[in-house]
Image: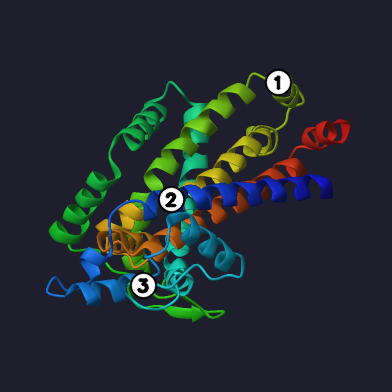
């Protein structure tokens, strides 16, 4: 197990270095932030001083080496716009994004697994067909359109929920969260629902497929032959065996939820990392863009590592194969 974790950590470090190079070149080779940040009436001397102050007067390869050296010490550069460390700026917004992602994932899991079980146990019933139709719509409908429809229905027409913002926050172990107050929960419901839609549909279909396959296995037939109750057969023999791939997908999708929360945060004015990156792209705030992408890549890599470790603990066959190798 220790060798496996060490090998994955080395692979993760290599991935981060490659991604830092791709991200840095991709971001720094496009556009000129001086054109946006400097007053159009500035003379050439002012423009030259601004370029030197931002470190843009050096060759691209030299800028990358300086960035890499600083990044290894935890310094991802200073925001051109806010004039504060980009890492600090992103970490201030991270709790909002993580709260939204956790709320969306929890919603998808709590609804997706029971609905998928229902559709798998009764595939020909009208509820089962309705659940599968809903999952297809969840895959097909664009996130931004669903978000706008949610705002139009629940915020504008019915007036039940706020259309945007995070609401009041409360410090929990030094981290500001909004789900500890009713007003914060009201602000969280619409964006979390919008973000959870795709993941909910995926979990429903995975659970249904796993249930249909598990019902045909010999251990389920043997359990029924022993006279076990239907609830015990489903809860112990069916659900326990289909949870392994579902947990794996949930873990991997959690990283995607964090990465693709940009659209939801923009629609609902949720003050998270996604909203920050959109604002930074509009003004070509390069250090913030690069820092955001690297932090997201790091989160995804760490989540993948945690999923692999959890999978090896849940499925003994993985450990046997690793030991044999």
Distance of label 1 from label 2 (alpha carbons): 58 Å
Q: Nearer the viewer, mark 1 or mark 2?
A: 2
Q: Secondary structure at mark 1?
A: helix
- The answer to whether residue 1 is visible is no
Q: In the image as oriented, which residue stretches furthest toward the front?
A: 45
Per the image, the residue denoted by label 1 is 221
Residue 288's x, y, as percent? 40, 65
Q: Secondary structure at mark 3?
A: helix
Per the image, the residue denoted by label 3 is 52
Q: Nearer the viewer, residue 123 or 51?
A: 51
Which mark identifies residue 291? none
Q: In the image as oriented, which residue stretches furthest toward the right?
A: 324
Residue 123's x, y, as percent? 46, 23
Per the image, the residue denoted by label 2 is 25
Q: Nearer the viewer, mark 3 or mark 2?
A: 3
Residue at 49%, 38% in the rendered image: 203
Colour scheme employed for the rendering of this structure: rainbow
In terms of sequence position, does the residue under pointer 3 or pointer 2 come before the other?
A: 2
Is 264 displayed left or right of 124 in the figure? left
Q: Nearer the viewer, residue 311 or 131?
A: 311
């Amino acid at each position: 197990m220790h060798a496996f974790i060490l090998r994955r950590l080395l692979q993760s470090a290599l991935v981060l270095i490659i991604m830092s190079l791709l991200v840095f070149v991709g971001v720094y080779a496009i556009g000129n932030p001086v054109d946006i940040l400097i007053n159009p009436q500035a003379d050439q001397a002012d423009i030259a001083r601004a370029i030197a102050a931002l470190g843009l007067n050096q060759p691209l390869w030299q800028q990358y080496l300086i960035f890499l050296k600083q990044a290894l010490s935890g310094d991802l550069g200073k925001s051109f716009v806010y004039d504060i460390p980009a890492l600090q700026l992103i970490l201030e917004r991270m709790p909002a994004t993580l709260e939204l992602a956790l709320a969306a994932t929890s919603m998808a899991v709590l609804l997706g697994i029971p609905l998928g079980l229902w559709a798998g146990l009764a595939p020909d019933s009208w509820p089962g067909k309705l659940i599968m139709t809903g999952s297809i719509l969840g895959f097909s409908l664009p996130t931004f359109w669903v978000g706008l429809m949610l705002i139009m229905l629940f915020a504008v027409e019915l007036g039940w929920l706020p259309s945007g913002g995070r609401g009041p926050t409360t410090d929990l172990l030094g981290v500001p969260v909004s789900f500890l107050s009713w007003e914060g929960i009201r602000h969280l419901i619409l964006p979390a629902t919008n973000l959870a839609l795709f993941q909910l549909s995926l979990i429903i279909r995975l659970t249904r497929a796993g249930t249909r396959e598990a019902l045909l296995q010999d251990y389920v037939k043997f359990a029924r032959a022993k006279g076990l109750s239907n609830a015990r057969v489903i809860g112990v023999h069916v659900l326990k065996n289909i949870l392994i791939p579902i947990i794996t997908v949930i873990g991997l999708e959690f990283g995607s939820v964090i990465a693709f929360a940009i659209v939801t945060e923009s629609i609902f004015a949720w003050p998270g990392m996604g909203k920050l990156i959109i604002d930074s792209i509009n003004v070509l705030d390069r250090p913030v863009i690069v820092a955001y992408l690297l932090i997201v890549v790091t989160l995804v890599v760490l989540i993948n590592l945690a999923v692999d470790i959890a999978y090896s603990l849940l499925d003994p066959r993985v450990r046997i194969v690793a030991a044999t190798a």
